Amino acid sequence: MFKSRIKLFTRKVTEAFTACGLVMVQGDLTALSLKHVIIAGRVGVLTGLAFMACSFFRSDNRLMPIYLTGVFVTIADWITHPSAIGHDLVEPLITGACAMMIAYAYDKFKR
């Protein structure tokens, strides 16, 4: 039980970190700096903690964790740093959508 929650936390941190890092540098990995890594790490940890809290609730819907990944990443990104793309919510929404795609790809690969 505890091991599965740690595994979930690690997976969600990784998904959120990857999505946030890619969107912040707009796909140009040569522009990735330590500042970007720290911000993406914060977004990842907040997302992982939100999933740890939700792991106590049971859901039989296979797509719910994918949806919640996008929601939690969007909120964590919005809280953590100001948007560098357009309006205040543009970058967090793009990051959340990217995280959902990563979570969906992981879910498909896992099966």
Image: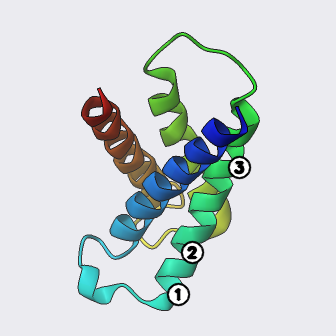
Q: How is the image coloured?
A: rainbow
Apparent side of residue 104 relative to residue 34 in the rendered image (left or right): left
Identify the secondary structure beneath mark 1: helix
Number of residue marks: 3
Disc 2 residue crowd, few under 14, some 14–19, many 20+, Cα 10 Å:
some
Instruction: Identify the mark at residue 35; answer none if there is no mark.
Output: 1
Assess whether mark 1 and mark 3 are in contact (beta carbons under 8 angstroms): no
- Which amino acid does the dot numbered 1 rest on? Lys
Residue at the spot 34% in from the left edge and 76% down from the top edge: 25
- Which amino acid does the dot numbered 3 rest on? Leu
Percent coordinates x, y for residue 49 in the rendering: 71, 49
Disc 3 residue crowd, few under 14, some 14–19, many 20+, Cα 10 Å:
some
Assess whether mark 1 and mark 2 are in contact (beta carbons under 8 angstroms): yes
Residue 82 in sight here: no
Residue under circle 3? 49
When the figure is inspected, residue 82 is found, relative to residue 61, above or below; the finding is below
Residue toward you, 24 or 60: 60
| Distance between mark 2 and mark 3 Cα atoms | 16 Å
Q: Quadrant of residue 56?
A: top right
